[in-house]
Structure formats: structure tokens, C-alpha cells
Amino acid sequence: MTNQFTITIDDTYCEYQYVLNLPDHIAIYDIIDIVCDRLNIETPEGKFMKKPTTKAGKAAKVAKVMGEYKRGTLHAGVNPKGPKKAPLAKSRKQAVAIALSQAGMSKKKK
């Protein structure tokens, strides 16, 4: 059985509206992934996104976050005082810690 979902994304410049025919047992983060793929935009990170569970998924997440650090767009957490973004990650060590945390991994023991 499929359900019809109408998704509206409000951007600062324009509004996107998509109608999707999807199975009724699909999870919200899968719907978000589908819409982001169709719009060619990056998937938002947030409390509704699941952490990767496979080894390859975790490695890909770490690689993605380290790429953000390399481009200079990795933020070090969330600003607790409001909707502003937190300051950028300053060191490689800090970026590794953020990447491992987002992937649900821990640092290797020596």
C-alpha cells in the first residue's frame, strides 16, 4: 500500500513542493533523504537523522565530516543561546572528535 506525501520546503528565495508516492511504512529520515536527493541538496543533520549502523556507513560519515572540516564549514556543536551556528572547528583534533561522535564511534585505544 502506498500513501501520497506532499512535502513543502521553504527556502529563503523560493518554495519547493513535491508529491511523492511512498509506502506507508517508510521512516521520516528516508523521506528526507529522497527529497534531498531529488533537490540535489545536502541532507540536513539534526535530531531526526539516524546514526549509521554499519562499518562502511560509519566510515562514510567520518569522511563526510572531515571533508567539512577541510572545506572550513564544520561547526563545533550548536550555539545554546539561540539559532545561530556555533563557531567553526579550529583544530584537526576537534574535527576528529566531532566526526567520531556523529558516527557513533569511539577513539581507538593505544
Image (spheres, grey):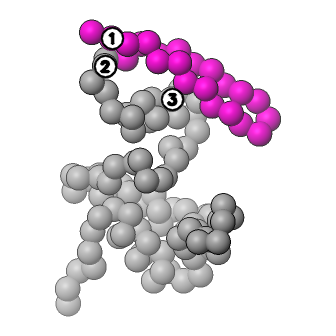
**Does 15 appear in magenta?**
yes
Residue 24 numbered mark, or none:
2
Q: Is residue 24 above or below residue 72?
A: above
Q: Residue at x 66, y 61 (%)?
A: 83
Q: Which amino acid lies under the numbered mark 3 shown in the image of this protein?
A: Val
Residue 103, position as x, y percentages in the image: 33, 62
Q: Is residue 16 above or below residue 98?
A: above
Q: Residues within 10 Å of mark 3 (few under 14, many from 20)?
A: many
Q: Residue at x 63, y 31 (%)?
A: 9
Label 2's element?
loop
Answer whether residue 97 is visible to the viewer in this image: yes
Q: In what quadrant of the picture does the N terminus appear? A: top left
Q: Is residue 44 above or below residue 82?
A: above
Q: Residues within 10 Å of mark 1 (few under 14, many from 20)?
A: few
The foreground one among 43 and 69 is: 43
Choose top left, top right, bottom left or bottom right for residue 102.
bottom left
Label 1's element?
strand
Q: Which residue is mark 3?
A: 35
The foreground one among 74 and 56 is: 74
Is label 2 in contact with label 1 (beta carbons under 8 Å)? Answer: yes
Q: Marks 2 and 3, Cα distance to the nearest angstrom?
A: 16 Å
Label 3's element?
helix
Q: Which residue is mark 1?
A: 2
Residue 107, position as x, y percentages in the image: 27, 79
Q: Which amino acid lies under the numbered mark 2 shown in the image of this protein?
A: Asp
Q: Which amino acid lies under the numbered mark 1 shown in the image of this protein?
A: Thr
Which one is earlier in the sequence, the residue at label 2 or at label 1?
1
Which one is earlier in the sequence, the residue at label 1 or at label 3?
1
Look at the image and give the residue range highlighted in magenta: 1-22
